[in-house]
Image (cartoon, grey):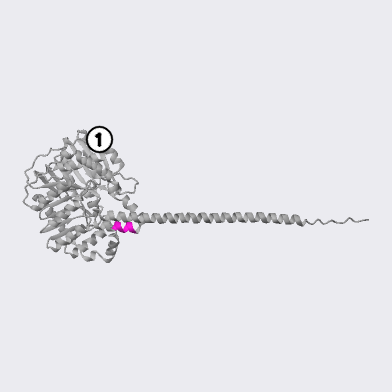
Amino acid sequence: MNKSKKVSRSPDNSVLKIRTEKNAFFGTIKVAIVALLVIAQLAIQIFLYSVFAWASGIYSLIAFILSLISCIFLISSNRSTASKAVWTMIILLLFQVGFILYVMTNPKFFFRRPRKRFKQVFARSETQRKEYDAPEISDDRVREDCEYLNRVGGFTPFTATETQYFPSGGQLFDDVLEKVAKAEKFVFIEFFIISDGVLLERFISLLTEKVKAGVDVRIIYDDLGSRSFSRKARTRIKKSGIKLMTFNKLVPMVNVVLNIRDHRKIVVVDGKFAYTGGANLADEYTNESRLYGYWKDEGIRVEGEAVDGFTLMFLRQWDFLTRKFSDFEPFFKHADKKDNNFVTVPFSCGLDRDVFIGKELYLNVIAKAQKKLYLMTPYLVPDDAIFNMLCNKAQSGCDVRIVLPAIPDKPYVYVVSLDFAARLLDKGVKIYLMRDSFVHSKIVYTDYCAIVGSINIDLRSFYQQFESALYTNDEKVLKAVGQDFENTFAECEPLTKKKNNAKNRLLALLLKVVSPLM
């Protein structure tokens, strides 16, 4: 039997060769594609990097040029020397974004339109401003101060006015409430801080009754300062018929406008009485509540022709906020003339004008003090001009004294204040700390005049806030303010070097870098 033979089928060599070549071809194509993709990816990355590097270089160059231009504008501006130094450092160190920060915090850019609106308000209300009539003043220093306030701010020196100084917030508000209770025509109120509490309840109850009697009641408050002014209280006030306006509402925008605040304190009753000073409408100012020990504050009342000066300040601010032009005529010339020949000048300062009036007037008065110069302030962060002038007066033999709080409300500012105080101490200035108290009074008192109001000796009051104050040479006020200082000195302890220890000096050194921005 024949066995069948197995036939082995081996692949044809030519077929294997074709398959191998085909696989190799596709493999090569695959590798080539991958290689091309890799090369393309690298090329794109290199291109993007080159574009970014080129763009970054161009941007850096442009940013550097713009930062230099910003520095030139900054140096030629009327900012304080310390502020110029800090901003120059910020702009150059962060040159890629420094010029943007400078522009975003420059009032020339972000406060231009509000300032234009202020000018319109001023122009419309110019007829209500009393023409400057140089009073007969024997002291050339007083006459020079009056001429300065009139030239730079249009503020009128009044005579025929009586004044009453109050050495505490409690005495001030007792008198305010007494006069408001007798109001028949209008009550104007403007405060940096309005806060819920016993004092506000007294005002709301009284003002609500006044509105029912037909009295025109208007209130302006600062949105940042009045953080404790509840929505509930504001609703009650509006429902009662009281007109309420907010200055500079807090909104989520990064610009200098948020830092511009209405720090003024003004009350006008029937055009017959007006008040200003350091005290706000909150319980701590009357010591109804104790936040930082005893709260030392002050205020002043004017009765007579000078009331119109405060009325004009308030109505201008009201028209600015409402964006409407109200009839000013019914609110003026209600006060009786008083038998008083001393000068009284109500004045305000802020970004509504191109001149830093409060700071410059302080400088003028300090420079002309001869025998004594007493200051009371919660914060002591002067610019170079004020600091050097205080040193000069002390070294010239003038009795220069400054009263500061022993208990601070802002510890970081207090550290800087103590450091400035210690440096002034070396130059012969006497520094007093009021024991167990927070001193909130803002007073400049010399041998020839006094300034009582809301202006602190710090860069915020000088350059960033709206302030109100009263300048006078009235002997009655000078005597009362002088007595207040003597009483306060008795409650103080002198500042010594030990108070400003090495730790505080080091911290102050760091904080002073940003003190112009405080």
Q: Looking at the picture, does residue 233 appear above or below residue 18? A: above
Is the residue marked by circle 1 packed among few (<14), some (14-19), or many (20+) residues within 10 Å?
Answer: some
Identify the residue shown where x is 16% and y is 50%. Answer: 452
Identify the residue shown where x is 14% and y is 42%. Answer: 307
Image location (x, y in percent) of residue 118? 23, 42
Q: Looking at the picture, does residue 433 appear above or below residue 143? A: below
**How many numbered marks are there?**
1
Image location (x, y in percent) of residue 85? 27, 58
Image location (x, y in percent) of residue 87? 30, 56
The kind of residue on which mark 1 rests is Gly
Mark 1 residue element: loop
Image location (x, y in percent) of residue 386? 19, 57
Instruction: Answer whether residue 91 is magenta in the image.
Output: yes
Residue 177 visible in rendering: no
Principal SS element in the magenta part? helix
Task: From the viewer's perspective, tell me whether residue 163 is left or right of residue 40.
Answer: left
Residue 60 visible in rendering: yes
Quadrant for the N terminus in the image: bottom right
Q: Looking at the picture, does residue 39 appear above or below residue 271? A: below
Q: Which residue is mark 1?
A: 241
Identify the residue shown where x is 64% and y is 56%. Answer: 28
Q: Nearer the viewer, residue 186 or 249?
A: 249
Farthest residue to the right: give it: 1
Quadrant for the C terminus in the image: bottom left
Residues shaded magenta: 86-92
Instruction: Answer whether residue 270 is magenta in the image.
Output: no
Q: Nearer the viewer, residue 233 or 132?
A: 132
Q: Nearer the viewer, residue 457 or 502?
A: 457
